[in-house]
Amino acid sequence: MNPTAVVRPLPGPGLAARAGDLLMVCADAGDGVEELLGLVTEVAAAGGDGSVLVRRVAALLAADFNGLIDYEQLGRDALLSIPTPDHYLPLLYVIGAWRQSDPITFPVEGIDGGSVSMLAVQAGR
């Protein structure tokens, strides 16, 4: 099954998108919203859950560090994916060392033990 995202406007510039059991709310439907909607549809079609969507959105937002730094604003799934800040702070160190000319890659992905994300971020070669 390949669910299509159902999109509804919110007051102001925001929107809500739902595909399968996944729901994403964007406060501002500006640049990049098409990519975000594509992610919702893609993750839902693959049977992914909210934690998968949060990792994919984090990858998409890698160049927008304010979105990653203020992770609490990414919603409930982000808060569940990051139980305490010490699990997330190493990512901020990588961001601090990143130069715009450095590629950002995700050399390790996956879930260990059914619930622990093993996502690793690499800045540079």
Image (spheres, rainbow, N blue to C red):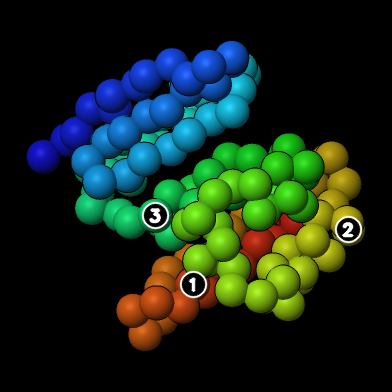
Q: What residue did someone put label 3 on?
A: 50
Indicate the quadrant containing the N terminus: top left, top right, bottom left or bottom right.
top left
67 vs 39, nearest the viewer? 67
Amino acid type at image mark 2: Ala
Neighbourhood count class around disc 2 (C-alpha, 10 Å): few under 14, some 14–19, many 20 upward: few
Indicate the quadrant containing the C terminus: top left, top right, bottom left or bottom right.
bottom right
- The x and y percentages for residue 88 are 69, 68
- Which tag, 3 or 2, sits closer to the chain's start? 3
- The x and y percentages for residue 31 are 62, 19
Amino acid type at image mark 1: Ser
Q: Is residue 6 left or right of residue 58?
A: left
> Mark 3 against mark 1, which lies toward the viewer?
3
Q: Residue at x 23, y 27 (%)?
A: 4
Dot 3 falls on a residue whose secondary structure is: helix
Q: Residue at x 28, y 24 (%)?
A: 6
Dot 2 falls on a residue whose secondary structure is: helix
Q: What residue did someone put label 2 on?
A: 97
Q: Is residue 91 left or right of residue 74?
A: right
Amino acid type at image mark 3: Gly
Q: Quadrant of residue 95?
A: bottom right
> Mark 3 against mark 2, which lies toward the viewer?
3
Q: Is residue 60 left or right of residue 97?
A: left
Q: Which mark is residue 68?
A: none
Q: Quadrant of residue 48?
A: bottom left
10, above or below 49, in the image:
above
In the displayed orientation, state which residue is furthest to the bottom: 113
67, above or below 4, in the image:
below
Q: What residue did someone put label 1 on?
A: 117
Determine whether label 1 and label 2 are within 8 Å by CB: no
Evaluate whether residue 8 shows in this view.
yes
- The x and y percentages for residue 49 are 33, 56
Q: Residue at x 83, y 65 (%)?
A: 93
